[in-house]
Structure formats: structure tokens, C-alpha cells
Image: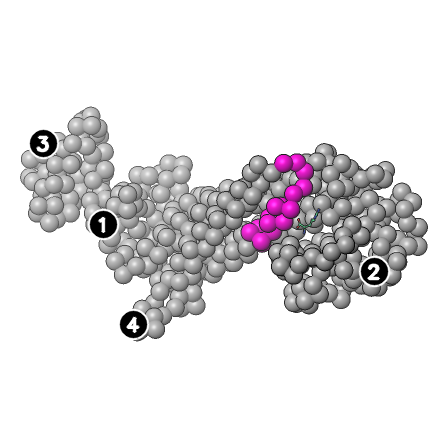
């Protein structure tokens, strides 16, 4: 039976029920709905709506329900056919304690109830996501440490630019995931306010101590305006936004690794446990895990756009449009969570093919900047040195040689100041070691950065 039957004489259509019911989605708020109801029982007891004994009986029944139902078998909840999770819990409660169960909704609305449930859910899932981000962060730091001095080409425009270490590459993503962690923490701190006691929209009609209610539910504070309380979904938008930015980072990392793993680059090998084969081509070992991380980024962005668009132009206060907030959010959290776990697993088994990566770093004139810096040290203005080295590169390409294989006589045709002492400047080691500045790729800088992250 619906919670609102009295006002109606006709039956609702089956199509409307199918369209309107949210239980197949919001069953995931079961635990939060019961926990919120327990706190509400205390709140209405404290203002004399129910007696202390009634409160004890209601809470005992709610706790029993929590144990009986659980979230393990969604079908057990969904098949009940209630309109939403709030109706489901109330129905079950009434089945247990009879008329007493009908007192619990005094002074409360499903509007402040759903807002509270969803914030409780965001806080719980948010904490789990922070833990997952922490695991990925630690896995990347491990990888950076294992490969602190593995040399590979660094790219701009997907053109080999300057050599970097693999450790340096890994630490770039560490920075991104640290920002993701702080963004999520920030979103969660704003979500940490309790809407319960706001009623349908105007505030509950009973003198409930909303500060006490908020702390009973482990919220940092109560919300302060009842209209805002029941119509605010910023926490959903912010979680989807934090997830989207983080998925963008995961997707970029996946893309880098897919390229590093390609036959053309072959800088890394991925573990068998995170790759799959082709049904036709026996030689294939495909980076499916990484491609799916890249692929799932799209649906997460889609849900962010979905909730932003749903909320746009909604008048105050609650509107049923807002029931559409959950499906996207749940999918965002599930997708982000599994991608974080998957990324950590991929990194744990990743091996750098050092010889191939080193050879690639030595190709493509990645030491051209070093020659220009050498000319600067000999007194040539950088702009002129840049031009001269450009000409050297054109010549080297015509000879099909790297710069360091040109003779001093050949090099002197471009700049007389070049002598034998040029060659030590052109080695990979020199390229790396010169970047010995905060944030640079020199091995000791990367090692220091790793040590700082671990501390
Ligand atoms: N299932 C609804 C939702 O998720 C609960 C709130 C219903 N409130 C109402 N006034 N119909 O938004």
C-alpha cells in the first residue's frame, strides 16, 4: 500500500507505478534509511510524540529489520513492490510493531528523509573511495620507486621531446591523485550537514533539537534552511564532479600505458592477470583493463551532465525530478571505485622493458636541447643556439645519425665553438642529471620526491 492513499479514489495505473517507483534503484539506501529512522525515533521521543517505551520498541524493531534484510540480496527488497525504500522500511516496521509503526513518520517527510539518506550514503561511500584512492596512490609510489631510474622518452605532441625516468612519469599521476583526494575530502566536508528535521520544505512543526539529531547521525552540523535542505543536491553534483576529474586522470594514465604497451613503443609489459586475448589472433595480448578504464570515463561524465541538467531550472523546493539523482550517482561511484581498484592492480604487475625504453629515449634527437645549452655555456645567445641546433638536426637526419655520432669537424660547420667536450653533454645521463631542480626528472630529485611522499 502506498503512503499516501487517503487523498485518492481511483487506482494508479500500472504504467504510472512502474514509472514512479524508485525502489529498484534506491534499495541501496536501506541501511541509511533505517539508521535515519532510529535517530528520528529518538528525536520525536525527546519532544513527547512517542513515549520512551514506544521509542525503545520502534528502535528494537528497526534494528531487527537491519539484521534481517541487509543489502546482500537486492531482489529481496525490490520484489516487495513498495514505492521506494522509505515506504519499504515503514511497511516492514508496521508489519513488526503494528500501529506503533505508523507513529514514526510524525513531523518527518520523505523529502528530508531522502536528502538525509543520500548524504549518509555519500559519506559512507566517499570514505571507501578515499581509501581506494589511497591504495592507488601507494601503488604508484611503489612503482616510482621500482623504476626510479628507468629511462624512457618524455613526449610533447606525442613527439619524443626529452628523456625522463619512469619514476618521474609515475609521480606525475601521484600529484593528480593527491588533488583528487583533496577534492573528494572537500566535497565530503560540505556534504556533512544533516537535513533531517526540515520536514517537507518549511521545517518540522515539532521543537526537535536538530543539533543533537545531526550529531546522533554523525553529521558535523545540521543544515540551516529547510527549503535548501530538501532541494539541495550539490553533494551529488560535487561527487560526480570529483569522480569525473579523477576519471579524467585515470583515463590519461590508461592512455599513456596503452601507448607504452603498444607494439610500436614496447616500453612496458602488462601482467597476464589484467590482459586478455583475441578470439581470432593467437598472438594478441590486449590491454583491456586500461581500455575499460578509459571507456568508463564517458559514462561518469555523462552522469555529471545528467544531474547538472536535471537540477537546472528546478524551482524550490523538492520536485520529483530529483528522484533521478540516484541512478547516475550510484553508477558514478561504482564505476570510479572499480576503476581505482583496477588501476592499482594494473600498476602492481607492470614491468618496464628498460632496454627498449632506453633505446627509444636515445632516438628522436631528444638531446638537441642539450646541444643548445652547451652552445649557451660557450657564450652563444639561446635563440641563436636554438637555430644552429635546428640546422644540426636537419644535417643529422640527412646522414641518418644521432647528433652524438657526428664528428667535431661536422659539428663545427654549424658553430666553431664546438669542440671535443661536447660529447659528455649529449649522453642520456647528462640530459637527466641536468634536470636536478625541484620537480625535475634527475634521478636524485625523483628519489627525494618519493621519499617526501612516503614520509
Ligand atoms: N523516492 C523519492 C526520491 O527519491 C523520495 C521522496 C519522495 N517525496 C515526495 N514528495 N514524493 O526523491
Kindly identify which residue carries mark 4: 281
In the rendered image, the vertical position of residue 375 relative to residue 125, given as above or below = above
Comes first in the chain, label 3 or label 2: 2
| Secondary element at tag 3 | loop
Kindly identify which residue carries mark 1: 362
Residue 408 showing in the rendered view: no
| Secondary element at tag 2 | helix
Q: Position of residue 277 (x, y in %)?
A: 36, 70
Comes first in the chain, label 2 or label 1: 2
Per the rendered image, the range of residues in magenta is 315-330
Point 40% across, 36% down: residue? 438
Residues at marks 3 and 2 touching, judged by CB atoms closer than 8 Å? no
- Mark 4 residue's CB less than 8 Å from ligand 1: no
Viewer-closest of 156 and 12 = 12
- Nearer the camera: disc 1 or disc 3: 1
Kindly identify which residue carries mark 3: 416
Kindly identify which residue carries mark 2: 94
* Residue 415 location, quadrant: top left
- Mark 1 residue's CB less than 8 Å from ligand 1: no
- Nearer the camera: disc 4 or disc 2: 2
Amino acid at each position: 500500500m502506498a503512503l499516501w492513499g487517503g487523498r485518492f479514489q481511483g487506482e494508479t495505473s500500472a504504467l504510472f507505478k512502474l514509472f514512479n517507483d524508485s525502489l529498484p534503484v534506491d534499495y541501496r539506501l536501506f541501511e541509511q534509511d533505517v539508521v535515519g529512522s532510529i535517530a528520528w525515533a529518538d528525536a520525536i521521543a525527546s519532544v513527547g510524540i512517542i513515549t520512551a517505551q514506544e521509542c525503545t520498541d520502534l528502535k528494537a524493531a528497526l534494528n531487527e529489520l537491519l539484521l534481517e534484510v541487509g543489502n546482500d540480496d537486492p531482489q529481496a527488497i525490490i520484489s516487495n513492490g513498495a514505492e521506494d525504500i522509505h515506504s519499504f522500511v515503514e511497511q516492514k516496521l508496521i508489519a513488526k510493531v503494528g500501529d506503533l509503526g505508523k507513529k514514526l513518520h510524525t513531523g518527518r517527510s520523505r523529502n528530508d528523509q531522502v536528502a538525509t539518506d543520500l548524504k549518509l550514503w555519500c559519506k559512507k561511500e566517499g570514505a571507501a573511495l578515499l581509501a581506494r584512492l589511497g591504495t592507488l596512490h601507494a601503488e604508484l609510489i611503489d612503482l616510482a620507486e621500482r623504476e626510479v631510474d628507468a629511462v624512457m622518452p618524455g613526449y610533447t605532441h606525442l613527439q619524443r621531446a626529452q628523456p625522463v625516468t619512469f619514476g618521474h612519469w609515475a609521480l606525475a599521476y601521484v600529484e593528480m591523485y593527491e588533488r583528487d583526494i583533496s577534492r573528494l575530502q572537500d566535497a565530503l566536508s560540505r556534504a556533512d550537514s544533516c537535513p533531517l528535521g526540515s520536514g517537507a520544505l518549511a521545517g518540522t512543526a515539532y521543537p526537535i533539537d536538530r543539533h543533537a539529531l545531526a550529531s546522533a547521525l554523525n553529521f558535523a552540523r545540521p543544515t540551516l534552511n529547510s527549503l535548501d535542505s530538501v532541494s539541495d543536491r550539490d553533494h551529488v553534483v560535487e561527487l560526480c564532479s570529483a569522480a569525473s576529474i579523477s576519471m579524467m586522470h585515470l583515463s590519461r594514465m590508461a592512455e599513456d600505458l596503452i601507448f607504452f604497451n603498444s607494439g610500436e613503443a614496447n616500453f612496458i609489459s602488462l601482467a597476464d592477470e589484467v590482459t586478455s586475448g583475441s578470439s581470432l589472433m593467437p598472438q594478441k595480448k590486449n590491454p583491456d583493463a586500461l581500455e575499460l578504464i578509459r571507456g568508463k570515463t564517458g559514462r561518469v561524465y555523462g552522469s555529471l551532465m545528467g544531474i547538472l541538467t536535471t537540477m537546472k531550472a528546478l524551482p524550490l523546493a523538492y520536485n520529483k525530478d530529483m528522484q533521478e539523482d540516484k541512478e547516475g550517482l550510484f553508477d558514478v561511484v561504482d564505476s570510479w571505485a572499480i576503476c581505482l581498484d583496477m588501476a592499482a592492480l594494473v600498476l602492481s604487475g607492470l614491468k618496464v622493458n628498460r632496454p627498449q625504453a632506453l633505446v627509444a629515449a636515445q632516438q628522436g634527437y631528444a638531446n638537441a636541447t642539450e646541444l643548445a645549452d652547451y652552445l649557451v655555456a660557450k657564450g652563444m645567445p639561446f635563440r641563436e643556439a636554438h637555430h644552429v641546433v635546428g640546422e644540426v638536426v636537419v644535417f643529422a637526419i640527412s646522414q641518418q645519425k644521432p647528433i652524438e655520432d657526428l664528428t667535431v669537424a661536422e659539428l663545427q660547420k654549424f658553430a666553431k665553438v664546438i669542440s671535443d667536450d661536447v660529447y659528455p653533454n649529449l649522453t642520456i645521463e647528462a640530459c637527466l642529471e641536468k634536470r636536478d631542480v625541484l620537480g625535475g626528472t634527475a634521478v636524485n630529485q625523483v628519489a627525494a620526491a618519493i621519499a617526501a611522499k612516503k614520509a
